Each structure stands twice: as C-alpha cells, then as structure tokens.
Image: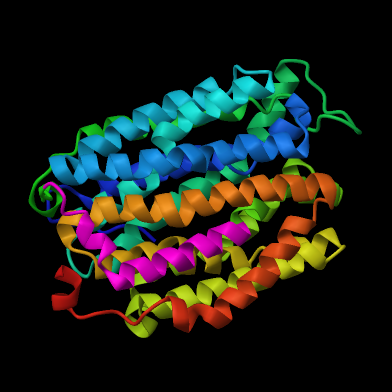
C-alpha cells in the first residue's frame, strides 16, 4: 500500500505528498486520541471546561480555514501555505505541554487552531491539485500513508510513554491520573509536524497547484447549489458526531479502560480504514462520491449506537471497526465530492469553507454540548445522541446531497 513513484502533475514525486501526510497525521495521532483525557485527568478540568477548550479549535477555525483557503487560491502558493500551516501547528502542539490552568489551555488551543484547523483542508486541496487524473485513485494511495502514520503513533505511543514515565519515576494512579507523563505527546507531535513543514516548503509548485482565482470569485460558491447542500449535510453530521469523537476517551475511561485501551481501540478503528482509503478511487468509480458518503453516515450510525448503548467494554471495542468506514465515507468522501462540484481555481477556498461551516461550526456546537452532556447526563450520552442522529441523517441524505453535476454546471 504505497504511493506510486511516478511524478505528479507539478513535477514532484507523489512520495513527497505521502511523506507530508504521514508526518502530519502522525502528529495528530499523538494528540487527538488523548487530549480530552489529558485535560480531564492530568489537568483536572470539568466536563464543561473540556468542552469549551475543545470547542476553541472549531471556533478559531471559522476564521482561519476560509482565510488560509483564500490566501492559497489568490496567491497560487498552495505548497508554501501548507508549509506555513505545518510550522504553526508544530509550534502549537509543543506549546500545549506548558499550560496548567483552564484559561491558559483555551488560549493555547486557540493559537494552535489558527494553523491546525486549516492544515487538513489545505493539504487536501494541494494533493488534489498536484496529483494527476484520476485524482481520487492517486489521492487514496497518497492519503493512506497518513492513516498508517496515525496508526503507528497510536500503537507505539503507550510503550514510549511508559518508558518515559519509568525513566522519570512517574507512576499511574489507580483512581487518579492513568498517564502522568502524557504531556510527552505534545512534544513528539510538534517534532513530527515540524518535519512535515520542511517537506512542504521544499515542494516546487507548477501547473494546477499554482492556479489563481480572481478577486471576488469566491461568490461562485454561494451560487453553487451542489456545494451549498453538501455544506448543510456536513454541518449536521459534525454537529451530532464530533463531540462524541472528541470525548470518546472519557467514555472509554468510564468503562474501566485507560491509555492502553484507547490505543487498542484506535488500532481497531484504522484497521479497515487503511484498505478503504488506499482503494478510495475504486470505491468512487463504483458508487460515486455520493454513494461513498451514504455508506459513511450509515457506518457512523452503527458505530455510535453500539458505543453509546453497550455496557461491555469489549463490545464498544469491537464497534470501532466502523470508524474506518466513516472516515472513508465522510472525512474523505465529502471533500472529494466538493472537489468535483467547484471550479479548480477555487478548490482551496471551497475546502476551507467546507471546513469552516461544515466542520468547525458543527464541531464548535457539538463539543460544547457534548461536554455538558458528559457533566449532566453521563459519559455515554454524546455517543447515544450521535448514533440516533446519524441514522436520521442517513435517511435524509437523498434530500441533502445532490447527484453530481456535469462539468458545465461545475464551472458556473
């Protein structure tokens, strides 16, 4: 499962993009699965406070994502923009090891979000611009390296963490902090993404990568009914599911699991994701981006329904196999759909707006509400809401996600 060694349309080997994806998602794999657990146990924040901290990411993303998208499209410097975003994200990750108070974590997370929230949509736009047709097939082979990097980080980090804690004389507490050295994750994540910045800044840009949009052309997106409808669907999807994802470590901990259990579940999550992402192009050819999205939202309904209502940790563990299908269908399927319905010169702006409205706004409201659900109802409540809501969205998908347009409609 390796990207082709052929050069992409801008004259650079696909390996460079694969390396960037590997390093960026390796860093994410060190932070995302454990951040809410760190805030809960190591810092001692309450559920509502954790929700506010986690909501800071999408809140800042509301501004950062379209801003960086416009900078990339207007300048045509998509690879350099990704490099800058990697540098800012690396510094933001490393800085999270410093705060000890709620307010400091809000500020530190906001600083991180200025760059990190725009990194994934920017990297998607860069990859789709740089890779030759059929972009979905080549994109899947490159993007799967990110999944492998994420999986390697999640699988290996508990062993690195325990060795680090042992060397520093730190011991887990049976009824308290299960991973006293967890701040190590932020430092390692910063190092990984810093290396990604070096790779991105070395990319030579030409061809589709440097296509520029004219001033005010972003208004074409507002008039694009395909784009607007999928924005609504994406917003609702993240509104009802992102909070349960962010606070998933707290659910696992409430069922008696710790860092090792969270790590093992993430390995299960990506086990199916790897072949699906690698064969993304084949799936798109067979059932189209709209069909891929439909499969993803059904998988989300199954995953969260089981996770929220099951009382056995082993059953929750097994249900995480549906995560890979959700990533394939939602996290990758929707951006591919968007890339098919918008003009090429607006692809970075479109991905930024998708992240702003669909992901950031939905995640902002989801993280806050999920935090209070944990505090007022219990740790399983966000997953229960996510499962029921995903089922409703699956039934409503034909109304919310239109069939793909022809090329003439895409350009209007």
| Residue appearing at x 39%, y 34% in the figure | 115
Side (left or right) of 141 relative to 218: right
Decide if residue 157 is on the left or right side of residue 353: right
403 on left or right of 374: left
Please say whether residue 256 is visible from this viewpoint. Answer: yes
Image quadrant of residue 315? bottom right
Colour logic: rainbow
Q: Is residue 246 visible?
A: no
Q: Viewer-proximal residue, 396 or 344?
A: 396
Q: Give percent across and percent down for residue 177.
A: 81, 29
Residue 23: image location, x then y, percent = 41, 39
Instruction: Give the percent coordinates (x, y) of residue 382.
Output: 72, 56
- For the image, the number of numbered tags is 0
Quadrant in the rendering for residue 77: top left
Q: Residue at x 35, y 80 (%)?
A: 288
- Which quarter of the rendering shows the N terminus? bottom left
Task: Please provide the residue range marked out in magenta.
Answer: 215-241
Which image quadrant: the C terminus?
Answer: bottom left
Q: Measuring 12% from the left and 43% from the top, which residue is drawn there?
A: 205
Q: Would residue 63 appear left or right of 363 to someone viewing this image?
A: left
Q: Main secondary structure of the magenta part?
A: helix
Position above or below: 99 against 396: above
In this rendering, the answer to whether 37 lies above or below 261 is above
Residue 273 belongs to magenta span: no
Please say whether residue 221 is one of the residues in the magenta stretch. Answer: yes
Q: Nearer the viewer, residue 253 or 234?
A: 234
Residue 174 is situated, as x and y percent measured from the top left of the image, at: 90, 33
């Amino acid at each position: 499962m390796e990207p082709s060694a052929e050069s992409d349309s801008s004259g650079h080997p696909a390996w460079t993009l694969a390396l960037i994806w590997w390093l960026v998602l390796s860093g994410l794999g060190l932070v995302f699965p454990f951040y809410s657990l760190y805030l809960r146990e190591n810092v001692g924040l309450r559920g509502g406070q954790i929700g506010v901290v986690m909501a800071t990411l999408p809140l800042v993303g509301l501004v950062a994502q379209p801003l960086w998208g416009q900078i990339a499209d207007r300048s045509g410097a998509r690879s350099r923009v990704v490099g800058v975003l990697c540098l800012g994200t690396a510094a933001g990750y490393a800085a999270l090891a410093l705060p000890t108070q709620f307010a400091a974590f809000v500020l530190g997370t906001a600083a991180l979000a200025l760059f990190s929230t725009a990194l994934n949509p920017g990297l998607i736009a860069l990859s789709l611009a740089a890779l030759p047709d059929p972009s979905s097939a080549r994109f899947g082979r490159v993007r799967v390296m990110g999944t492998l990097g994420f999986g390697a980080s999640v699988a290996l980090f508990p062993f690195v963490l325990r060795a680090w804690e042992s060397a520093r004389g730190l011991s887990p507490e049976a009824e308290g902090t299960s991973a006293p050295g967890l701040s190590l994750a932020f430092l390692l994540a910063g190092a990984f993404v810093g290396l990604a910045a070096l790779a991105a800044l070395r990319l030579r840009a030409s061809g589709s990568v440097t296509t520029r949009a004219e001033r005010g052309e972003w208004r074409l997106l507002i008039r694009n009914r395909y784009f607007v409808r999928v924005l609504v669907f994406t917003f609702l999807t993240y509104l009802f599911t992102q909070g349960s994802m962010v606070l998933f470590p707290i659910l696992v901990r409430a069922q008696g699991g710790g860092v090792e259990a969270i790590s093992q579940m993430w390995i299960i999550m990506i086990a199916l994701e790897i072949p699906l992402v690698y064969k993304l192009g084949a799936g798109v050819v067979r059932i189209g981006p709209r069909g891929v999205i439909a499969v993803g939202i059904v998988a989300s309904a199954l995953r969260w329904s089981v996770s929220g209502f099951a009382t056995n940790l082993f059953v929750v563990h097994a249900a995480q196999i549906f995560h890979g299908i959700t990533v394939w269908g939602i996290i990758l399927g929707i951006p591919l759909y968007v890339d098919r319905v918008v003009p090429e010169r607006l692809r970075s702006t479109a991905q930024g707006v998708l992240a702003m409205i669909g992901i950031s706004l939905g995640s902002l409201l989801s993280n806050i509400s999920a935090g209070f659900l944990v505090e007022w109802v219990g740790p399983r409540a966000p997953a229960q809401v996510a499962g029921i809501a995903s089922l409703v969205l699956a039934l409503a998908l034909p109304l919310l996600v239109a069939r793909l347009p022809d090329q003439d409609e895409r350009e209007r």
